Image: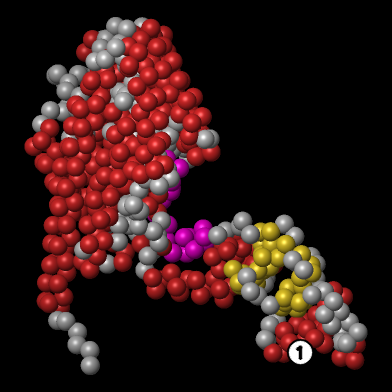
Amino acid sequence: MRFRLQPSAELRALGMRARQIGMLAVLTGAVTGLMVAGFERLVSDGMLDPVLRGPIGVQAFAPAAGLALAALALRWVARGATPATADEYVRSFHESDDRLDLRPAPGRVLASIMTLGTGAPMGFEGPSIYIGASVGTWLQQRFHRFFAPADRKLLMVCGAAAGVAAIFKAPATGMVFALEVPYRQDLARRMLLPAMFSAAASYVVFASVNGTTPLFPIAGAPPFDLRDLLGAAALGLACGAGARLFAAALLAAKSLATRWPRTVRVAIGGGSIAGCFAAGRLLTGESVVIGPGYTTIGWALEPGHAFGVILALFAVRGLATVFAVGAGGVGGLFVPLVVQGALAGSAMGSLVNASAASATLFPLLGVAAFLGAGYRVPLAAVVFVAESTGRPGFVVPGLIAAASSQLLMGRASVTPYQQDVRIGLLERRRALPVTAALRPEAATVPPTATVAELYRHHLGELRLRTVAVVDGTRFCGIVALADLAAVPPEAWQATLARDVMHTDVAVADVRWTLGQAIAAMEAADVDRLAVVDGDAFVGIVTTGEILKLDAILQTAGEPGLTGSP
């Protein structure tokens, strides 16, 4: 006999579960904050600072050595894993049946230490997000009994938020970024409060180790007027166009990083970064091309730089980051977008001859616009500018710049795993490959079979209304029960399947999605389609198999298939 809890008992149970999840979110944030603080100390103080203080030759070629060591770490420690860090979080978020794989985590983190500690022009936030997501995934696996199936990746999101909150000393940015980055036009739902708890805890732990100084301390509060707001909109459009080109270059570099041999891409990437470093020294007299880019941002915030020099550095620094990604460097792209935005804003300020009071304003608006466009996170970009500078007065013009930058981005992004919006069960099912509902063992008949054999076995015993005619592996056509009515029974022994089959039937390509197959069924008014690869028969997809798949997915309650996380 089953007993049902009373409403008051149910509410108490739900409250207890919410408190347990909240405590686990705080634990995720605290552990992440501590680990990211150690990571930042090791990479920045222990490795990168000595490189930046070293001779020019060391600064020029240290990134190449780091990229080579990172390739070895990915090959031997991470067992051939990709260089993805923040991308891996976004990919795992959308993989309904796959948790974040923790096995390559030590190797990826080691590779990121080699990449960033030797001066490759990438950001610390990518590994920080990955560290936090890994911590959250590990804790959720250990305490899975506290979570519903639809919340199976909640602590992974909390960990990602904690990683950003720690490395940037910006808890609100971490919370918003982790919820905003999985989608181009939407937010992850039902995770706001746990992500907030985790980001806050991470910030407190990190700040207790590395201090609370804002990332970009800005003196005073630069005023802005209507002219500056119009300039913010124009800057946003320019940054949107620039971010779109930069995103395309980064995605091309990521593709090359998976296709070219490691030795080739490391040699080309390392040598190219050295060339970019030399160009940056000639332009500015400073080492502004290597490292995560905070020095470059400081340079961009200084007034008085020539417009041409700023544009040249914008191109050189951007190329250096593209080469680092193409060489398989393991690091983040958040800060490189910030750097490009600061340089774009500085160029705009120089072009319009901005006043001394506005000299700081335009680079920071460029940060909001370029970051918001490149990662498709306009809210996180605006919050980041306010938090990282300690000046909330930048929110209004920053919001205008970030909003206008979205107009020219289209569907582009620096990460290939983003989706436009959350999608429900029906849409998710239609996006699956047609092979998800394929029946490869479906009954077929050779073209030389007689109608009598066809009727006796396929239509009589198996009760099939249609049968695919296949000659070896080549698909020939379809025979339907109604086609036999036109053949007199006395002629069944002499009539072959090829004589009555239909060749002008709708078929599905093996590379189709279920949505395409369903549309083809509706257009042809049939309940099944032969699936082919060229002219080779692969199997049959039917409405019954699709409905059966639907039932399986609903029973599983996977978060990615029900519109969650």
**Residue in the picture at 43% in, 69% down:** 553
* Above or below, 67 relative to 454: above
Res 367 quadrant in image: top left
On whether residue 121 falls in the magenta region, the answer is no
Res 219 quadrant in image: top left
Residue toward you, 519 or 312: 312
- Horizontal relation, residue 75 to residue 171: left or right: right
* Above or below, 1 relative to 97: below
- The residue that mark 1 highlights is 456
Q: Position of residue 463 (x, y in %)?
A: 68, 86
Residue toward you, 401 or 389: 389
The number of callouts visible is 1
Say if residue 56 shows up in the picture.
Answer: yes
* Above or below, 518 relative to 250: below
On whether residue 427 falls in the magenta region, the answer is yes
What stretch of residues is rendered in magenta?
A: 415-432
Res 65 quadrant in image: top left
Image quarter where the N terminus lies is bottom left
- Horizontal relation, residue 395 to residue 433: left or right: left
Image quarter where the C terminus lies is bottom left
Q: Amino acid at mark 1?
A: Arg
Say if residue 89 shows up in the picture.
Answer: no
